[in-house]
Amino acid sequence: MRNGQETRNRIIEQSAVLFNEKGYSGSSINDIMDATGLKKGGIYRHFKNKDELALEAFNYAVDVLRKSYRQAVSGKNSAEEKLIAVLSVYRNVVEAPPLQGGCPVLNTAVDTDDTHPLLNQRVREVMSEWLSLLSSILREGIQSKEFRADLDVEEAAIFLTSAFEGSIMMGKLYKDNEYVEKYAAQLKRYINYCVKQ
C-alpha cells in the first residue's frame, strides 16, 4: 500500500509540472507516461481519468504555492513587508519559480477558460483564496495604521494581483526576470503613493 501511495504522489507531482508547462489540453496521456515513466495502466490504476489527475495535480501545485507564500511571510512583522514578500515569490520566474513552468493559477486559468469547467471552477476558488490572503494583509495594514484607512481593499487586491500575474506572464514570455523586477519597483511605488498613510 505504501508503494502504491508513493507512486500516486509521484504521478501527481510530475503531472503538476507537466500540466503547468504544457497545459492540461496540451498534455496527452503519452506525455504523462513519458513524464512519469509509467505505462497507461500504471497511471489509470491510480486515477479514473485524466480529469481526476488534473485536479489532483492542480491541488498539489497550489500547495506548493501556499508553502512559498507562508515561507515568504515568515519572520515579517509589518503588513507592508508581508505584502511585498508574497508579491515577490516569482522574483526569479525564469530560473527558479515556486513550481516549474510559472504560475499554475495563471496557466490553468487560461488553459481551462473554455475547455474544462470543473478545473476552471477550482482555479476560481484558488484565486478567491489568494485575493482573500492579500485582502487580509491589507486590512492588517489598515488596523496597524500602516495603510490608509480609506483604502479600497478589494480594489487594491485585484489591481495588485492583475499586475503580479501580468509580470509573471511577461517574464515567462520573454524569458527575462527584468519584467518581474520592474513590477517589484512599481509595487513599492504603488504602496508608498496609494496604500500607505
Image: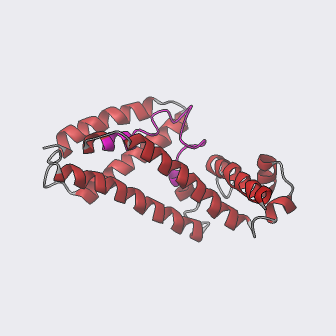
Q: Residue at x 33, y 53 (%)?
A: 134
Residue 103 among magenta residues: yes
Please state the total of marks drawn on the protein image: 0
**For this view, does 55 lie left or right of residue 121?**
right
Is 86 situated above or below 149?
Answer: above
Please tell me in which quadrant of the rendered image residue 99 appears.
Answer: top right
Dividing the image into 4 quarters, which one contains the C terminus?
top left
> Is 73 part of what is drawn in magenta?
no
Q: Is residue 49 left or right of residue 92?
A: right
- The correct choice, above or below, for 122 with respect to 168 in the image is below
Q: Nearer the viewer, residue 130 or 111?
A: 130
Seen at 35% across and 59% down, the residue is 132
Residue 129 point in image, percent of width and height: 41, 61
Q: Is residue 87 visible?
A: no
Q: Which residues are magenta?
A: 82-107
- Point 40% across, 45% down: residue: 164
Specify whether residue 83 is in view: yes
Main SS category, magenta section: loop
